[in-house]
Amino acid sequence: MIRSIIVGTGSYSPAKILTNKDMESIIDTTDEWITQRTGIKQRHIVEDGETTADLGEKAARAALENAGLTTDDLDMIILATSTPNNTFPATSVDIQNRLGMHHGVAFDVQAVCSGFVFALTTADQYIKSGYAKRILVIGAETFSRLLDWEDRTTCVLFGDGAGAVIVEAGEGEGTSADRGILTSHLRSDGVHKDKLYVDGGPSTTGTTGKLRMQGKEVFRHAVGMITDVIEDAYKATGLTSDDLDWFIPHQANKRIIDASAKKLKIDPKKVVITVDRHGNTSAASIPLAICEAVKDGRVKKGDIILLEAMGGGFTWGSVLLRW
Ligand code: ACO
């Protein structure tokens, strides 16, 4: 059977860093409060004029270079973002053009913090069906543009960044010994739409709006939803937490990550954590974390890796793969 194998990774974080100490001079907060509740120590923030397409393009170029490929080798670009440059056209089409790619197709996927898991699963379906052989999957966000910088309950949590992977069709036997994506599980339930949302949009206020969140409600649902889709992945493959080499979760909050890993009995040494250095970068956080763990040599060919995310909607999902 056809399997989707990750053959390249790349990432980009804006140069400007805001530490928790810097946040103390913007709003009534402390490094201690932010660190204790979230594990976040700093976030990267775009400069005026720097956009989601700028970040996504840089991450995409890094992934292509890492894979030793050019855009001639791609059939498709899927960008996960909730902070597009414009309402339309899709930011992926802008990135496609910046990369000098004028064949194939590019489109955006919008599932907020679960965006990368949704985009990677979408890519896997196109590859398994034979529609595409190689797909660039990007998560890129400028959440700083959606933040109400006077709301201390949200503005300390998020940051900007981009990560990208290239997935390629390969042959497998249909067992968990195969390389590539072994299974993925996506969910959504709009009954939760008011717990984490942006209070504007083209069809309502005609403005971009600002991020609003019932933090406690998000926290209350997150661990249960995450563990549900991970248990689905275990059921589908026969693998368990003991088989994992690396757990690379959406980097929203260290407390959510720790609680999920504990509930699933995942060894803390197998958990990749980068949230301390970039905050919650929504759809960019998983590829940022993957890229770091690949670069520093933790992730090796043949490793079993579990990805998961949960975000606004709510949306949530898991991807289990062999590197
Ligand atoms: N600095 C200092 N004090 C603060 C801050 C701040 N930045 N923000 C809130 N406080 C205060 C509150 O005003 C409150 O004060 P009070 O007791 O005098 O009223 C106190 O801290 C406690 O506030 P809570 O909202 O109860 O804090 P809580 O313990 O719930 O922590 C947090 C808040 C960190 C947002 C938590 O609810 C959380 O992690 N939720 C998950 C949210 C999340 O990760 N969202 C990301 C998007 S979804 C996803 O990606 C999974």
Image: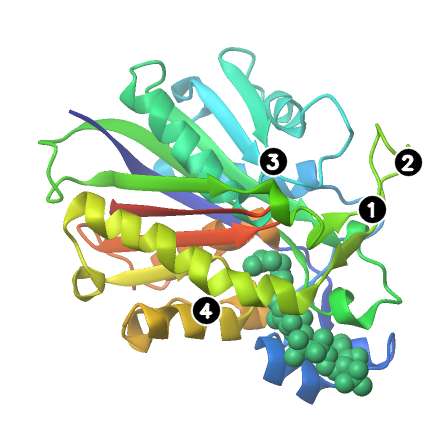
Q: CA distance from mark 2 to mark 3?
A: 19 Å
Q: Please, what secondary structure does the residue beneath circle 4 have?
A: helix
Q: Secondary structure at mark 3?
A: loop
Q: Amino acid at mark 1?
A: Asp
Q: Residues within 10 Å of mark 2 (few under 14, many from 20)?
A: few
Q: Earlier in the sequence, mark 3 or mark 4?
A: 3
* Residue type, mark 4 in image: Ile
Check disc 2 and give the amino acid type: Thr
Query: Disc 2 designates what residue?
Result: 205
Q: SS for tag 1?
A: loop
Q: Which mark is residue 257?
A: 4
Q: Would you say the beta carbon of the disc 2 residue lies within 8 angstroms of ligand 1? A: no
Q: Is residue 18 visible?
A: yes
Q: Nearer the viewer, mark 1 or mark 3?
A: 1
**Direction front: furthest residue:** 191
Q: Are marks 1 and 2 in contact (CB under 8 Å)?
A: yes
Sequence-wise, the earlier of marks 4 and 1 is 1
3D distance between C-alphas at marks 4 and 2: 35 Å
Residue at position x 13%, y 31% from top?
Answer: 172
Indicate the secondary structure of the residue bearing disc 2.
loop
Q: Nearer the viewer, residue 52 or 15?
A: 52
